Amino acid sequence: MGRSSEDDPLTAALAPPPNEKPAEREARERAEAESKRVSDEIDAQLRRERENEKKRKPVKLLLLGQSESGKTATLKILLADIFQFQLLYCKRQWSQDRASWRCVILLNLVRNMNDILDILGREMAAANPEALPVASSKMTQPTAIPTSTATIGSPIAYGLPLLKFKDKHRLLRLRLAPLRRVQSDLEARLGAAATELYTTNTNSAAPFDSGSSTTPKPREKEFSIHSTNGWKTALERFRAARRRSGEDSGVLRKVRDMEDEVLDVIAGCRDDMRSIWEDRVVREMLSRRKVRIEDSAGFFLNDVDRIARTDYQITDDDIIRARLRTVGVQEYRVTFEHGHSAGSEWRMYDVGGTRSSRAVWYSYFDDVDAIIFLAPVSCFDEKLAEDRHVNRLEDSYMLWKSVCACKLLARTQLVLFLNKCDLLQAKLMRGAKIRDSVPSFGDRRNDVATATRYFQQHFKEIQRTYSPVQRPFYVHLTSVIDTKSTAVTLGAVEESILRDHLRRADLM
Ligand SMILES: Nc1nc2c(ncn2[C@@H]2O[C@H](COP(=O)(O)OP(=O)(O)OP(=O)(O)O)[C@@H](O)[C@H]2O)c(=O)[nH]1
Ligand SMILES: [Mg+2]
């Protein structure tokens, strides 16, 4: 048998007292209305907080693209721009970073020179085999030379007269020999990031492709290098050394000694480096071998007078142009204080772009708001450094296709940067023909506007064909080392990503 509501103790407790007088009833109802109002207000407050919580969800941005496509350069501009307006600690962090980048730039400069000296040694040995013992002309693989322009053939193969090397060249080589030691010291200090990769253990453009299921793979520890702020890995080694040195004056002396020694040697070589770089015979030698050091990543020889000095003051531009390979995946967290993103936290991920580094990308695809994908278009006639069988533009197409097709990224905003337009322009001005490397380009006009339109169309078609759900095609023609215009482009991109992010939060 069921109980009547009068039997229910809760109902009984809440029921108005029997014999309630009108004044008491009025007071009770007022109290009840007041507690309902307070309760509604609390509910509304909780709802608002939940909304804000959703909006406070960090914006997740990934930078993808093959090695040397300009991912890190783009991130540097983003961060430099943000840090200009940020809290003091960010500024302090940025200025520490600047000091560390100085060593990278010195390494880039020294490597430019050693690459030339390598080629010079080889040419001089060929021109006069008796004059140079074989051992002294033993080469290491040139490191900073663009893959498409690495040494090709000997002058004899071109049927040209032998180059006329003089005692001056022998002397310069001898005097610049200490730069080898400087390069290996700096490389040892910076670790894996300081050297480029020339081999790969994967022959797939997108080794993350096999995992097109919806569950992210567990992150591979060896690649998951995290930081909450600042430049990681290689640069961290410098900071760590400085920190340690603060505790131990012996270590401090060693760190300073090393840096002073490096700077002294480089400054002492300044005039000789300039002589080699400006030498007519050396230029002719490089041109015959089709080596364009000036197009390589981290080229600083034109600035030797400014950089090779003990009081070298680094500029923002130097930092953007400096080349340091990204190892693994690096995370940067920034909370904006100004502008349209004020109050929102952004998590940005910069990845290593060589083929063997790409497998780990997939574990970062979960819940990504946007991807900036960099495709260097000046590379239409170049091969991948890590796999000399693969054309770099083809590799970018394959990679883009996999990113577009990835189900986990179906709702992610994709922003394509057709980068290195400045180098494309210079290359076409020198007479390079696109159709020689890209037969489908046919008889179109061999200029930047036509070429970028053509490449853009190809990327657009890939996106349209392979995206699981249709999405807008966002593309920008960039030369990211042009910091001012890149900052403007990134401002627009940032706004659009944030808009999408908030729209998504509303739908949650
Ligand atoms: N001239 C020119 N140089 C560029 C441009 N974008 C990037 N660079 C330079 O190219 C080099 C390679 O750029 P990074 O940003 O290190 O390339 P990345 O994509 O991060 O490469 P990984 O870390 O190996 O994956 C750097 O020295 C940059 O300064 C560009 O648009 N024009
Ligand atoms: Mg990088």
Image (cartoon, rainbow, N blue to C red):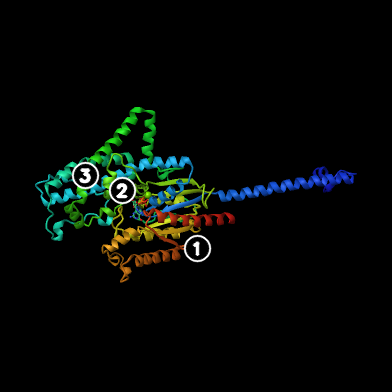
Q: Which residue is mark 1?
A: 469
Which is more toward the observer, 246 or 352? 246
Q: Residues within 10 Å of mark 1 (few under 14, many from 20)?
A: some
**Label 2: how many residues lie within 10 Å, few (<14), some (14-19) or many (20+)?**
some
Kindly identify the amino acid type of the residue bearing the numbered disc 3.
Answer: Asp
| Amino acid beneath label 2 | Glu
Of the numbered discs 3 and 2, the one sitting upstream in the chain is 2
**Tag 2, which secondary structure?**
loop
Q: Is residue 229 left or right of residue 99?
A: right
The answer to whether mark 2 is within 8 Å of ligand 1 is: yes
Q: CA distance from mark 3 to mark 1?
A: 59 Å
Kindly give the residue lying farthest to the bottom in the view shown.
443
Q: Nearer the viewer, residue 494 or 57?
A: 494
Residue 424 in the image: above or below residue 271:
below
Task: Kindly identify which numbered label has been placed on residue 404.
Answer: none
Q: Is residue 418 visible?
A: yes
Query: What is the secondary structure assignment of the residue under circle 1?
Result: loop
Residue 337: percent from the left, percent from the top? 52, 47
Look at 16% across and 46% down and name the residue there: 137
Count of all numbered marks drawn on residues in the image: 3
Please give the name of the residue rendered at 35% of the width and 67% of the height, measured from the top-left corner.
450
Single out the mark in the foreground, 2 or 1: 2
**Residue 271 - label:** 3
Q: Secondary structure at mark 3?
A: helix
Q: Is residue 244 above or below residue 329?
A: above
Position of residue 340 in the picture relative to residue 241 (left or right): right
Task: Check disc 3: other Cα within 10 Å, few if <14, some if 14-19, many if 20+.
Answer: some
Tell me the mark number nearer the camera, choosing from 3 and 2.
3
Mark drawn on residue 196: 2
